[in-house]
Image (cartoon, helix red, strand yellow):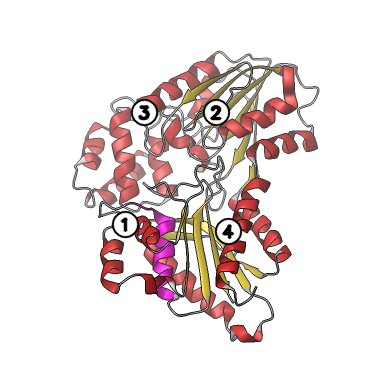
């Protein structure tokens, strides 16, 4: 296998697909409840709220465990389930930008919380995408304006922590504000993290994690990105800000927050499967974040140092395993996203070298394309011209470039969101 490029690429793709199956949200939630049993015997009244890209699977796992003890539930996601669990309501919402569907979902979430039974155990199942799918903006900011602002900030290359700080500051429910509406005395929050570092206040914009609003900090962040916004959206938001941003009230409930899956756990699964397939492996502990151009260059330099010796001296192919989430400053009209662009940039780094590189989103969606990312090798650049490569990179058309080189990966929506995966093979 060591010198068979196509065989290695096929093996790497299979490792990714099998890893996804091992992190099925329904199975994760069911096993978490079954193994801990901390909720057995507390009450026969279970109410469930599931939000995000993995909401459908997570809700199925919880209902499989609690069965008839579930009195009612609410699912909010951006994909329609084949079947809605009994006693659940389902709302189709939007991602990545909030809109009227997100507002309807947010208001339905508030109503669900306000009518929760004080004697019930209220279980939240939160996964990536929650921030956009449930939105109730502060007075003076419409959901349309907030949606346009989100788009502007993402295209400007804003990182997830700053973006979610803005989202929380402009929300009536995020940053722990949702707790103000909950009547249940016991609340459990099980989370699948799509955030490098697994910060509870950042996952889903911290619906159940109280955080004080800092109006001065919000203004400072928005002003920093105003110069990159030709549309005037940032200025409009600054002008429309309420004079005071309300902070979360006193927490009256017993709240348990627990992360049940994350990118770093996913990397461990990838490593185990890769070693079973005959790879030597190295996991990079530091997540890959920041601007995709700088991040890809840094990642390549790191791998060059780690590989060191000639590949001919190794008996097995070596696979570097890393995860994270980069950002892209969008100036063109092409298709693709951060993973497509990282793969594209790596194609130029590894030209005529014994490398294979895959960059892929675990949710199966990359930017504004239907692609999950791309897989390239030392021969990929030979399928393109330097002029075409430069033009497509500058126009943010990494997805089309990968397609033209037969290097795009299309998995479809996976129902999983554990940030991004980067696999670098030296053979």
Mark 1 near mark 3, Cβ–Cβ under 8 Å? no
Residue bearing mark 1: 397
Gap in Å between the C-alphas at discs 1 and 4? 23 Å
Between 222 and 38, which is closer to the camera in this rendering?
38
Crowdedness of circle 4 by 10 Å Cα count: few (<14), some, many (20+)? some
Residue 98 in percent (x, y) is at: 37, 33
In the image, is residue 174 above or below residue 3? Answer: above
Cβ–Cβ under 8 Å for marks 1 and 2? no
Magenta part of the chain:
335-349
For mark 2, what is the residue? 81
Q: Name the residue beneath numbered marker 3.
A: 137
Label 1 vs 3, first from the N-terminus: 3
Q: Calculate the distance from the C-alpha at mark 4 to the C-alpha at mark 3.
A: 41 Å
Q: Around disc 3, counting alpha carbons within 10 Å, would you say few (fewer than 14), some (14 to 19), or many (20 or more)? A: many
Residue at mark 4: 13
- The reply to whether dot 3 and dot 2 touch (C-beta < 8 Å) is no
């Amino acid at each position: 296998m060591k010198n068979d490029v196509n065989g290695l690429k096929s093996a790497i793709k299979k490792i990714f697909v099998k890893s996804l199956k091992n992190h099925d949200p329904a199975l994760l939630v069911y096993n978490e409840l079954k193994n801990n049993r901390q909720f057995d015997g507390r009450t026969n009244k279970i109410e469930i709220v599931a939000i995000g890209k993995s909401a459908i699977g997570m809700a199925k796992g919880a209902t499989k465990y609690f069965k008839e003890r579930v009195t009612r539930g609410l699912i909010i996601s951006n994909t329609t389930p084949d079947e809605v669990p009994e006693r659940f309501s389902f709302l189709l919402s939007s991602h990545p930008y909030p809109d009227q569907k997100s507002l309807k979902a947010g208001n339905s979430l508030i109503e669900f919380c306000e009518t929760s039974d004080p004697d019930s155990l209220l279980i939240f199942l939160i996964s990536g995408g929650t921030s956009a799918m449930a939105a109730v903006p502060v007075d003076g900011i419409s959901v349309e304006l907030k949606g346009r602002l989100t788009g502007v900030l993402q295209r400007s290359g804003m990182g997830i922590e700053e973006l979610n700080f803005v989202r929380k500051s402009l929300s009536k429910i995020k940053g722990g504000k949702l707790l103000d509406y909950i009547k249940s005395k016991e609340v459990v929050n099980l989370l699948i993290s799509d955030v490098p570092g697994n910060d509870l206040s950042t996952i889903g914009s911290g619906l159940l994690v109280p955080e004080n609003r800092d109006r001065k900090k919000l203004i400072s962040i928005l002003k920093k990105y105003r110069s990159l916004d030709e549309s005037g959206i940032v200025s409009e938001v600054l002008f429309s800000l309420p004079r005071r941003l309300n902070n979360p009230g006193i927490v009256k409930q017993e709240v348990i927050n627990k992360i049940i899956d994350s990118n770093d756990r996913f990397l461990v699964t990838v490593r185990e499967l890769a070693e079973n397939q005959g790879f030597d492996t190295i996991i990079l502990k530091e997540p890959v974040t920041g601007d995709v151009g700088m991040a890809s260059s840094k990642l390549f330099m790191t791998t060059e140092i780690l590989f060191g010796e000639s590949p001919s001296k190794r008996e097995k192919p070596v696979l570097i395993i890393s995860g994270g989430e980069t950002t892209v400053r969008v100036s063109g009209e092409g298709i693709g996203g951060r993973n497509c662009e990282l793969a594209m940039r790596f194609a130029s780094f590894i030209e005529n070298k014994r490398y294979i590189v895959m960059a892929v989103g675990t949710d199966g969606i990359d930017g504004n394309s239907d692609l999950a990312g791309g897989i390239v090798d030392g021969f990929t650049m030979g399928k393109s011209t330097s002029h075409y490569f430069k033009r497509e990179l500058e126009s943010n058309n990494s997805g089309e470039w990968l397609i033209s080189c037969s290097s795009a990966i299309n998995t479809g929506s996976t129902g999983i969101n554990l940030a991004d995966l980067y696999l670098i093979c030296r053979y």
